[in-house]
Image (spheres, helix red, strand yellow):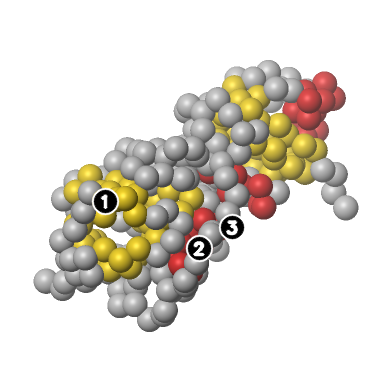
């Protein structure tokens, strides 16, 4: 067996393999998946000399622990967290050399939700439809990591970046989501649209990679009938029967039957990946140009 591999000692609450996902297959019912905080994943790859689309590990809340079979260079970005190598503190947000057999421990997030672990050469699990990403909704890609999993690694083909400080936004204290109304805003009352723009919402603990659920005032429907299932896009703000908005994230279904009142600007979605339960959410309505 190759020595270019990582053994998972502690899988954590939810650690998955992610890259830039598999967009372009919605007509087949396949979600795009991919890293929820794409800029953080890309930064981790840059720090270890990988192409931006190399597969990384996405941890959730309490990190993970890994043991490489050969010397590797790693970088941890995303949610700030303690990093140790062989029990000794190591820097977060910078390239770190991990000797063969040493324990790399990525601890619980100090703030935010998801940390990203890039290894020089990338995680080399078999791709499915052009991506190595785990998709929790469809089950495509490798399953979430479990203790004892062994992950193959690719060969490094770049020189990692030497840095002292990593410029990267911290997790939001308030999540501001710019939204464009539609396509089904006419299914809601005028007061519902006003509530969306002015209401006080918070991130629900029921949020996951499929969608960011909110707690707050319900949005009143103007149309009570059933909506035939139609295509869904990343960032769609769908309103289920309880009236509380759900923002679709990377593992969202490709179709849905609840009306979409608005769509979040793509640039605001990485922050949604790092918003812990209870974070205030403000929807800022931006009209079409």
Is residue 94 at all visible to an observer of this figure? Answer: yes
Tell me the residue that label 1 is attached to.
88
**Residue 214, percent across and down?**
59, 27
Q: Nearer the viewer, mark 3 or mark 1?
A: 1
Tell me the residue that label 3 is attached to.
167
Q: Is residue 213 left or right of residue 178?
A: left
Please say if the residues under marks 3 and 1 sit with CB atoms less than 8 Å apart: no
Please say if the residues under marks 3 and 2 sit with CB atoms less than 8 Å apart: no
**Residue 171, percent across and down?**
56, 41
Q: Quadrant of residue 45?
A: bottom left
Mark 2: secondary structure:
loop
Q: Residue at x 71, y 32 (%)?
A: 282
Q: Mark 1 or mark 2: name the one nearer the start of the chain.
A: 1
Tell me the residue that label 2 is attached to.
164
Residue 224 tag number:
none
Mark 1: secondary structure:
strand
């Amino acid at each position: 067996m190759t020595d270019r591999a990582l053994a998972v000692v502690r899988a954590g609450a939810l650690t998955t393999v992610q890259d830039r996902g598999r967009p372009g297959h919605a007509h087949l019912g396949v979600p795009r998946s991919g890293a929820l905080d794409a800029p953080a994943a890309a930064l981790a790859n840059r720090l270890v000399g990988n192409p931006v689309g190399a597969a990384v590990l996405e941890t959730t809340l309490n990190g993970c622990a890994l043991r490489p079979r050969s010397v590797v260079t790693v970088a941890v970005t995303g949610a700030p967290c303690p990093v140790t190598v062989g029990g000794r503190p190591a820097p977060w947000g910078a390239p770190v050399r991990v000797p063969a057999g040493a324990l790399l421990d990525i601890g619980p997030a100090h703030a935010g939700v998801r940390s990203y672990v890039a290894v020089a050469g990338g995680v080399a699990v078999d791709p499915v439809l052009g991506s190595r990403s785990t998709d929790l909704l469809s089950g495509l890609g490798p399953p979430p990591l479990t203790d004892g999993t062994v992950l193959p690694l690719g060969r490094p083909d770049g020189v990692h970046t030497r840095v002292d400080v990593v410029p990267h936004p911290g997790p939001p204290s308030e999540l501001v989501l710019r939204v464009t109304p539609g396509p089904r805003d006419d299914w809601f009352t005028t007061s519902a649209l006003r509530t969306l723009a002015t209401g006080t919402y918070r991130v629900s603990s029921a949020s996951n990679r499929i969608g960011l659920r909110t707690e707050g005032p319900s949005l009143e429907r103007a149309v009570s009938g059933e909506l035939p299932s139609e295509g869904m896009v990343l960032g769609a703000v769908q309103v289920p029967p309880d009236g509380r908005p759900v923002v679709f994230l990377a593992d969202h279904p490709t179709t849905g039957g609840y009306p979409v009142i608005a769509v979040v600007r793509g640039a605001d979605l990485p922050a949604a990946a790092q918003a812990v339960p209870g974070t205030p959410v403000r929807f800022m309505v931006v009209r079409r140009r």
